[in-house]
Amino acid sequence: MCSCQSMKGKKMKIVKWMPALLATLLAVPAFAQSTDTPKIDQRQANQQKRIDQGVQSGALTQQEAANLQKRQDKLAQHEQAAKADGVVTAKERHMLKREEDRNSRAIYRKKHNGRTTH
């Protein structure tokens, strides 16, 4: 008889903790998709430095630098649009990363195309 009451007590404890457990499990995906984009922000800063370095070294012409800057500005606009609804989804992050990849290749190509300001 004692073990029966013990089982009822355990079931009651489980039932009491179920709402808290469910709330926690449902909240986890909300944290997984936030508007924080530290990797994207850091990469944009690195690419901006690459453009600035290219201008200073003469590897980029003013026209090339202006074109690359427009691409960076467009990426920043896309990032802000992705953040506008309060959540940057995995799909949006993927699209931003692809745009960063394209911009990175463009920076490399422009810096190494043989055109210089000197």
Image (cartoon, rainbow, N blue to C red):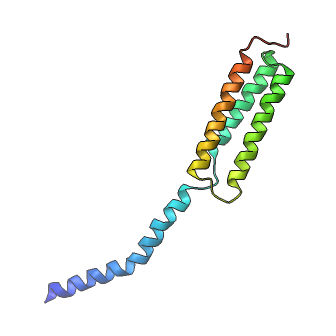
Quick one: 99 or 28, which is closer to the camera? 99
In the rendered image, residue 45, in percent from the top left (x then y), is placed at: 71, 35
Q: Please say if 80 is above or below 64.
A: below
Direction bottom: furthest residue:
1
Left or right, 41 with reference to 31? right
Residue under the image location 71 percent in, 57 percent down = 84
Residue under the image location 28 percent in, 81 percent down = 11
Q: Quadrant where the C terminus lies? A: top right
Answer with the quarter of the image where residue 20 lies: bottom left
Q: Count of labels shown?
A: 0
In the rendered image, residue 24, in percent from the top left (x then y), is placed at: 47, 68
Quick one: 47 or 109, which is closer to the camera? 109
Answer with the quarter of the image where residue 3 lies: bottom left
Residue under the image location 86 percent in, 22 percent down = 62
Quick one: 2 or 118, which is closer to the camera? 118
Left or right, 113 with reference to 88? right
Q: Please say if 71 is above or below 55.
A: below
Residue under the image location 74 percent in, 28 percent down = 49
Q: Quadrant where the N terminus lies? A: bottom left
In the rendered image, residue 86, in percent from the top left (x then y), is placed at: 66, 59
Left or right, 18 with reference to 10? right
Direction left: furthest residue:
1
Q: Please say if 72 is above or below 3.
A: above
Left or right, 19 with reference to 32? left
In the rendered image, residue 111, in percent from the top left (x then y), is placed at: 73, 18
